[in-house]
């Protein structure tokens, strides 16, 4: 099964400056659920579907925030063919967060 995750990025001033959309794929293998972000290659596993959704969101957030901390997020997104959509909005924290999933 596939879900679409909307991921927002906030700059250091707390404003949302762009959004990316990622594809999450979930499958059950024996007694475990496996989750994979198709664009980034991030994967994880868990016992339940709800748990795997949360764990994959957290793994993607950690991955994107670390790549940003290293200073090459725009190149990384481009290399992985992730479309970046600029946004004008205000929020209170900086970094990446998965904000919505479409099932």
Image (cartoon, helix red, strand yellow):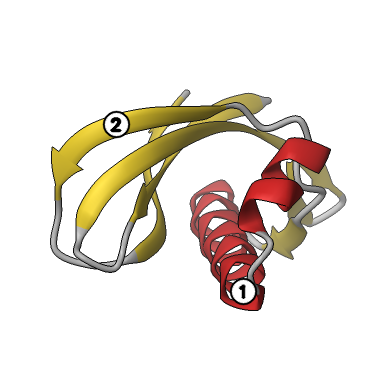
Q: Residue at x 74, y 61 (%)?
A: 44
Name the mark nearer the viewer: 1 or 2.
2
Q: How many numbered marks have been drawn onto this rendered protein structure?
A: 2
Whether residue 32 is situated above or below residue 66 in the rendered picture:
above
Whether residue 43 is situated above or below residue 19 in the rendered picture:
below
Q: Quadrant of the N terminus?
A: top right
Q: Secondary structure at mark 1?
A: helix
Whether residue 86 is situated above or below residue 8 in the rendered picture:
above
User: Is residue 35 visible from the viewing direction of this image?
Assistant: no
Instruction: State if disc 2 and disc 1 touch (CB < 8 Å).
Output: no
Question: Which callout, 1 or 2, points at the residue further toward the start of the chain?
Answer: 1
User: How busy is the neighbourhood of tag 1: few (under 14 within 10 Å), some, or many (20 plus)?
Assistant: some
Q: Residue at x 76, y 30 (%)?
A: 81
The answer to which quarter of the image holds residue 63 is bottom right
The answer to which quarter of the image holds residue 62 is bottom right
Which residue is label 1 attached to? 66
Which residue is label 2 attached to? 87
x, y (%) of residue 96?
43, 58
Asked if residue 65 lies left or right of residue 10, the reply is right
Asked if residue 4 lies left or right of residue 86, the reply is right
Asked if residue 57 lies left or right of residue 46, the reply is left
């Amino acid at each position: 099964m596939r879900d679409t995750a909307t991921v927002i990025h906030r700059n250091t001033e707390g404003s949302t400056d762009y959004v990316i959309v990622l594809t999450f794929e979930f499958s059950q293998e024996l007694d475990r659920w496996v989750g994979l972000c198709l664009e980034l290659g991030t994967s994880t596993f868990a016992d339940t579907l709800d748990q795997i959704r949360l764990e994959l969101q957290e793994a993607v957030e950690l991955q994107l925030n670390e790549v940003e901390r290293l200073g090459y997020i725009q190149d990384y997104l481009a290399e992985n063919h992730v479309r970046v959509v600029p946004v004008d909005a205000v929020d209170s924290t900086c970094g990446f967060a998965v904000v919505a999933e479409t099932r």
